[in-house]
Image: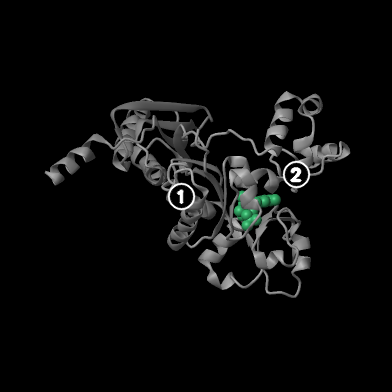
Amino acid sequence: MQNRVVMLVDFDYFFAQCEELRNPTLKDKPVVVGVYSGRTEESGAVSTSNYVARKYGVKSGMPLFLAKLKLEGTDAVFLPVDYEYYEQISDSIMRILRGYASSFEQVSVDEAYLDVTEQVQGSFETAKTYAQRIKTEAKSQVSISFSVGVGANKLVAKIACDSQKPDGLTIVKPEEAPSFLSPLPVDRLLGVGKKTSAKMDSLGIKTMGDLSNYDVQKLIAIFGKTLGIYFHNAANAVDNEPVQEQGEAESISRIGTLKQDSLDLAFILQKTDELIDDISKELAEKNLSFKQVAIYMVMTDLSSKTRSITLEQPAKDPETIKKNVKDLFEKFLSDSPLEVRRVGVKVSGFSREEPQQKQLTSFFQTS
Ligand code: DGT
Ligand code: CA
Ligand code: CA
């Protein structure tokens, strides 16, 4: 069987780079993005920082007061986490990256695996040019830099990527993998935290090389079958996990509270229209059609109710949601003894096919 070529893309100093993107004057300054716990103005932790701030010793997870101390006397900028904004940027890069792979697996807001075996015909030479192309093309579209690791599996790709940041490109060919991993400390492996690495240390296992030479039966006796085998394989650069698209969301929904309790259809629809616009944006981003529309009500006595309808054809437009939500509410309100306090809208039954109508139009246009 031909070997696989797997890439891991990891966006550089992601939250802080997003902040630089919307405010380029930040670029030369230390930038710290923090999660503020809210107790005092100072309390909280560093989520991430740009590389200028890292030069002063700022690290993710560090208390903010400590980061302030380290950056004293500089023109450092401290900003609160704006997750929604980062997610939007992440989505737009992910959409571009997806197009370069046969299978694509987003693992976090700033990381994704790409199986590019077919695209590069299994060649790591070609993979290098291909990765460079992805880097420049994606960067020209979204202006976010990222690091790439390439290996014959996810494990090697990930560790390769971590070894050179920011803007890195690290290729580890299958035959180079054992010597690449061997000198690295065991805690570079996913699943080896403080406790496990201390345990390994007590066994004389410090590096991946030590781990790969350690008797697998002993590893199983100490860590259990699943972990023991995983550690043994990982240290030997063996990983058969496929690159797999994460399951689609089953539904998209939004809920909101009415300005006042009400039984008035028009008033309620004003609120649901806002929710539907939001839902439609997400549907469009994900290119999904839906077949079910549901409404959700919390009544003045805090009891909740739902009503739903299944469409004959999948649809993807906001008008279809609005029309069905209106019908559902009309029916529901006509015999509701209680006023409504909160309302929600949910669409589900997703597919990616183009709705019928569009195919017809394109048929007519080409003929
Ligand atoms: P990198 O990849 O080393 O250039 O830098 P980042 O900041 O992209 O680091 P990464 O990939 O580990 O994490 C991605 C994002 O996740 C990062 O921008 C902020 C968030 N994050 C990472 N570590 C922490 C943490 O310890 N606490 C909190 N609150 N957020 C974190
Ligand atoms: Ca990152
Ligand atoms: Ca990451």
Residue at (82, 37) in percent of width and height: 200
* Position of residue 32 measured from the top left corner of the image (x, y, whole percent): 66, 62
Report how many numbered discs are placed on residues in the image.
2
Q: Tell me the element at label 2.
A: helix
- Give the amino acid at mark 2: Asp
| Visible residue check, residue 354 | yes
**Residue ID for mark 1:** 97
**Residue ID for mark 2:** 187
* Position of residue 90 measured from the top left corner of the image (x, y, whole percent): 51, 52
Which image quadrant: the C terminus? top left
Residue at (60, 49) in percent of width and height: 172
* Position of residue 161 measured from the top left corner of the image (x, y, whole percent): 61, 51
Asked whether mark 1 and ligand 2 are closer than 8 Å, the reply comes as: no
Residue at (70, 55) in percent of width and height: 60
* Position of residue 348 measured from the top left corner of the image (x, y, whole percent): 40, 31
* Foreground pick, 47 / 267: 47
